[in-house]
Amino acid sequence: MDPRVKVLIVDDSALFRQTLRTLLESESDIKVIGTAMDPYFAAQKITREKPDVITLDIEMPRMDGLTFLKKLMKQAPIPVVIITSLTQRGTALALKAIELGAVEVITKPQMDSKKLLEESRIKITDTIRSAAMAKLKEARVRKTVQTASAKRTFSPVKRPTTLITHNKVVAVGASTGGTDALKLFLQSLDEHSPGVVIVQHMPEKFTKSFADRLNEICRISVKEAENDDQVLPGTALIAPGNFHMSLFRIGNQYKVKIFAGELVNRHRPAVDVLFKSVAHHAGPNAIGVIMTGMGSDGAQGLWEMREAGAYTIAQDEKSCVVFGMPKKAIEKGAACTVLPLEQIAEDVLIQVNQEEVRD
């Protein structure tokens, strides 16, 4: 049996299909079993070839990607990676695709330079591998509908009018499956919760749309982080795609720094960059959470947080879409506790309420 990840490419651009095929076939563990110019051709090849992963464009003739995704998730669920362009419409539709069951969203390869093309190759191939390992759950779609309707009962967040500081900081790292996990986690918090800083592996511009969507359905304020943003109670800051985020402290205020840099653990933003800075600047005043995702990003940083006195949590295998990042952290001894996704927010709040505030 061929151990390679079998991929079907669905995109209306012949040039892009060939570009992506060449890029994927440069990896020895990935095999492109076919390409299709639209979902109708794709359906025929799915029946014959039985791919492990499908890459899917959203805007195509005859049938758009979202309609095809809905049908696919109902009739023959297969891990789907959305590969789309960096447009406002594209990001909104891509987030909708995740709600409908797509595993991951990435941008089309950048060919401006050899370095950008290499970074695109790393991101795309790693995403394909991660998607092949992902657990597909029909409940993900139902849960999205249920949690979105619950927004109607939430009261508006009262934004602070002065620069308040809170001694606890919650740092969260996630990758594949993290969009749903973060949604559930953040919807369990309220305006009295400690400030949250987040790295979710996601392309630039998508993080802004993702943060705006969460801000609509959560009781806390959620935004894409900007340089020198203060970490405030009842607020979550999400690292912008393609930029690292770190925490620093000035007096009794925690703030974030946004900066470009090399890939760390094959990612930018990287969870380790955030976690290591939190370990250094917040120490025992921090809580670290590592969620679903492939690879080892965040394991070392979470270990450094625990060594610095922080309380640390890893998501358990059963509730993960991909049990990679939490597994590496657990194996390293970085997690104080391992919990199902639905219990993490409650545990964070218990720790905040029970522990003495240390400055």
Image (cartoon, rainbow, N blue to C red):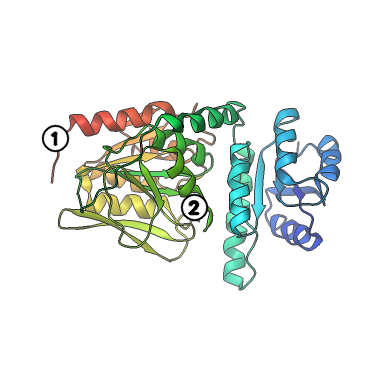
Question: Is 270 located above or below residue 325 in the figure?
Answer: below
Which kind of residue does numbered mark 1 sit on? Glu
Label 1: element kind: loop
Residue 21 is left or right of residue 260, and the answer is right
Q: CA distance from mark 1 to mark 2?
A: 34 Å
Q: Quadrant of residue 341?
A: top left
Q: Which quarter of the figure is the N terminus placed in? A: top right
Which kind of residue does numbered mark 2 sit on? Thr
Residue 141 is left or right of residue 33, and the answer is left
Mark 1 neighbour class, 10 Å CA radius: few under 14, some 14 to 19, many 20 or more: few
Nearer to us in this view, 173 or 27: 173
Nearer to us in this view, 250 or 32: 250
Estimate the x, y position of residue 31 in percent, counting from the top left.
74, 48
Residue 45 is left or right of residue 299, and the answer is right
Asked whether the residues under the numbered discs 1 and 2 touch, taking CB atoms below 8 Å apart as contact, a structural biologist would say: no
Estimate the x, y position of residue 13 in percent, counting from the top left.
78, 59
Label 2: element kind: helix
- Is residue 340 shown to the viewer in this render? no
Estimate the x, y position of residue 282 in percent, counting from the top left.
22, 49
Residue at point 81% right, 48% down?
38
Residue at point 51% right, 51% down?
209
Question: Is 299 located above or below residue 148 in the figure?
Answer: below
- Residue bearing the label numbered 1: 356
Residue at point 49% right, 52% down?
207
- Is residue 125 shown to the viewer in this render? yes
Could you say which disc has been placed on residue 90 in the image? Answer: none
Nearer to us in this view, 151 or 51: 151
- Front: mark 1 or 2: 2
Q: Quadrant of residue 184?
A: top left
Estimate the x, y position of residue 259 in percent, counting from the top left.
39, 65
- Residue bearing the label numbered 2: 207
